[in-house]
Each structure stands twice: as structure tokens, then as C-alpha cells.
Image (spheres, helix red, strand yellow):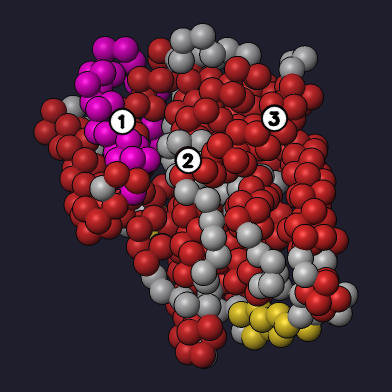
Amino acid sequence: MLLLASASVLPPVWMVAPFAILLLCIALMPLFASHFWEHHYPKVAVGLGLVTACYYVLVAHDWHPLHHAAHEYISFMALVGSLFVISGGINIRVKGEATPFINTVFLLIGAVLANLIGTTGASMLLIRPWIKMNKYRVTGLHIVFFIFVVSNVGGSLTPVGDPPLFLGFLRGVPFFWTLEHCWKGWALAVTLLLSVFFVLDVINFRRAPKEVRDLETAHETWFFRGLSNLLLLGLVLGAVLLPKNLQDIVLGGVLSVPAMIMISAAVVSYLTTRPVIHEANDFNFGPVKEVGFLFIGIFLTMIPALQILEHGGVAGVSSPLSYYFATGALSAFLDNAPTYLAFLASAMGQEGLSVDQSADVLAFSQQQGTHLLAISLGAVFFGAGSYIGNGPNFMVKAIADRSKVHTPGFIGYMVRFSIPVLLPILILVGWIMLGRL
């Protein structure tokens, strides 16, 4: 692990530029230069990462940050990739139409499932059945609330749930810390979101033609294929929970035992899943390929930013509630995983601790738990603030668009849903959970 850098060896402030440029590209390029970004994002991400790598190799003459980043990156991608591949081998089909009550229960199940297979896995597994069970009256309302609950807020109970929390786990936050401390915020946010959705869906239901409403009183018929992959999902979760002495076994300095188990489970799933299931899920490696390239750049370029934040902190951000809103504000428009680490580094730096020391992260989670809670909830919850706040958001929109569902555009998403509906709920949750701390 890295030692806390002294002020004399801190990277220059301008070395934060590649990190800032990459995050701005991730946020803005899909909106304003989508064709260029679609074809050239690997070059941009890797190129900016190489700028940082060259600084540490040729100027700082310090390989340790790069080695640490490589180990963390492989562990991260092993989890994200394995959950994506294995969940892609499970197919859910549904016949019949859903009532508002059934829809609400479905979203609640998705919020729980997101903590077991990740928000990306749960989104890819459930979005197609969600559209089909509402096919006669599906609107942008259904897609947006699916993004709110399943793709974001739901995955705040375990490190498996959302990338920011898994990065915290890799840094030293205990696996069950999130469940122990975040469950009240999770329960409150999910309850409020589902309550609002139920009311709005009842209105949508009553506007449907009578023959549709009569059809919706019939029960749904569910079909499941590829359920053997559930055993492989269990294997992945078991790998995350391996004893520390096994997790510390690392081949080549970068490939840990849990990562090897996860990769093996993904390979077995892909080779044993019938092609017809992959075809039904429209499965391809495009989304995980994009995550892989972008996070090469993120893991490299954020090294100088984290080291500088450990010493300088973020001006004006000190209370748990301020960390909640500051983390959330950036998570809504930038990738919430590096945002989480940036504010964690800042909060720990104010206590003289290093985000690169697992013992320091553990101590921080025990001594400054409310600050860690604020950063965790802010990163996960506010990732639903826009389509670019979290990876699954755009994936869900893309699938809905291909299914001929009218979804709101980038501005419409915020003006019609995230600002008037999501934001007041998250403000209330933050005030209740953190306002007096």
C-alpha cells in the first residue's frame, strides 16, 4: 500500500488536469460529440491515463502508485465484468400486464437485487421484462423511475451494489459497513420513491383504455431461463467475502485470488449459457468494454487528485451534510465512482489519514462514520440525477429507445423528473439522516 505523500513530494496541481479533462469528456462528449466519442473514447481515456503514468515514471520516479492502481483496477473490473457476464446469462420473460401495485413490488425487488448483482447487472436483467409487463401503457415515467430505484438508489447496501462502494471496499471499508450504516437511508429513499411512483402509476393506469385495464387484472406469467447462473453469482459473492489472508494472495502483484475466482465464474457462465439466452438478452460486451477503457483512464488520472486532496481538502466542505450534497452534486453529472474517492480522500485528509492506507480507511469508517455515510449516500443516490451520473442510466435509456419507448431527453429527464421529483426526496433524506450530525 502507498504511504501518505508528504507535501514536498506532492504532484503539481496541473497534474489534476488529465483527471478533470477525462471526467468532462465522459459527461459532455456523449451529448455534444456522440459519434466522435463512440469511436475514440478508448484513445482519449488511455491517452490521458498515459500522461499521468509518464509523470510518475519519468518525473517522480515512483512506480508504487501505478502498481497500486493496477491491482485496484483489475479487482474492480473482475467484479463488474463477472456480474455483467453472469447476469447476461439469465433471461426473464413475462406475459400479461402489470397493475401499479405489481409494478411497485417489482421495483422493490429490483432495489434489493441491485445489492446482490450490482446496479448494472440488475438493470440489464430486469429492464426488458419491465418494459414488456407494461407494454400497453409504458411511458418515460416507468423508465425514469426504474433508473431512480434499480439503477441507482437501490444499490447502496453492499459494496457489490454500486461501483463507488466497491472502490471503498477495495480501499479498506469493511464489507458489511454499508449495510449496517446505510440501510436507514436506503429504506427511506426507496420508500419515498416507490410511494411517489405508485401514485403516478395509478394515474397512468386510470388513463389507459378500459380494455387494457381489464387485461391488467389478469395475472402475469413468468418464464426464467439460465438459472444455473445463480450458482455462479453466489460464487462471485463468496469470492468478495473470502478471508483476508486469501484476499492478500496476489499473483504478479495485481491479480488477487478473489479476482481469479470472479473471472473464472464469468468464463464458465459465458461458455455454458445457451446462445438463445444471450440473443434474447441482446447480450454483447459493448457496455463492459466501455467501462473497462474508461476506468483505465480514471484509475490512473485520479492518482494525483487523490494525493492532493489528502492534504488540501475541499474548501467549505466539512460537515456530513455538506459532504452529502457536495458529493451528490458532482455525482449527478460526473462519474460517481471517482467522485466518491475524491471526497473520501478530502475527508480523510482533514483527519491526517490517507485513502491509500487500508488501516487508515478502516479507522476513518469507525471514527468518522457519519462522514463516510454522507459520501456513500451522496455518490450512490445522486447518480440518478442525470443520464450521465451512473453507467446503467444510459444503458437503460438505450434499451428503452430500441424498444420504441418514448423516453425524455437529457434536459427533459432533469426538468420533468430529477429536479422536481428526485431532488426534493434526496434533500429530505439527507436532512433526516445527516442534518443534525
Figure check: 408 above or below 385: below
Q: Which residue is mark 2?
A: 411
Disc 2, SS: helix
**Tag 2–tag 3 contact (CB < 8 Å):** no
Under mark 2, the amino acid is: Ile
x, y percentage for residue 101? 85, 61
Q: Is residue 372 visible?
A: no
Residue farthest to the top, as pictured: 316
Q: Secondary structure beneath disc 1?
A: helix
Name above or below for residue 124 compared with residue 352.
below
Mark sitting earlier along the chain (2/1):
1
Number of the label disc, if any, that sits on residue 20? 1
Which mark is nearer the camera, 2 or 3? 2
Q: CA distance from mark 2 to mark 1?
A: 23 Å
Residue 27 highlighted magenta (yes or no): yes
Q: Main secondary structure of the magenta part?
A: helix
Q: Which mark is residue 424?
A: 3
For discs 2 and 1, the disc positioned in front in the rendered view: 2
Task: Kindly identify the amino acid type of the residue bearing the numbered disc 1.
Answer: Ala
**Depth-wise, is mark 1 or mark 3 nearer the camera?**
3
Q: Marks 1 and 3, Cα distance to the nearest angstrom?
A: 29 Å
Q: Type of residue at label 3? A: Pro
How far across and down, in percent of the image, does residue 188 sit? Answer: 80, 38
Left/right placement of residue 105 relative to residue 26 reads right
Q: Is residue 177 above or below residue 89?
A: above
Which SS class for mark 3? helix
N-terminal label among 2 and 3: 2
| Rendered residue at 60%/41% (across/down) | 416
Q: Count residues near mark 3 (Cα–Cα under 10 Å), then give few for <14, some for 14-19, many for 20+.
A: few
Q: Residue 136: where, in percent of width, then height?
A: 69, 72
Q: Which portion, as a residue range, is magenta?
A: 1-30
Q: Earlier in the sequence, mark 1 or mark 3?
A: 1
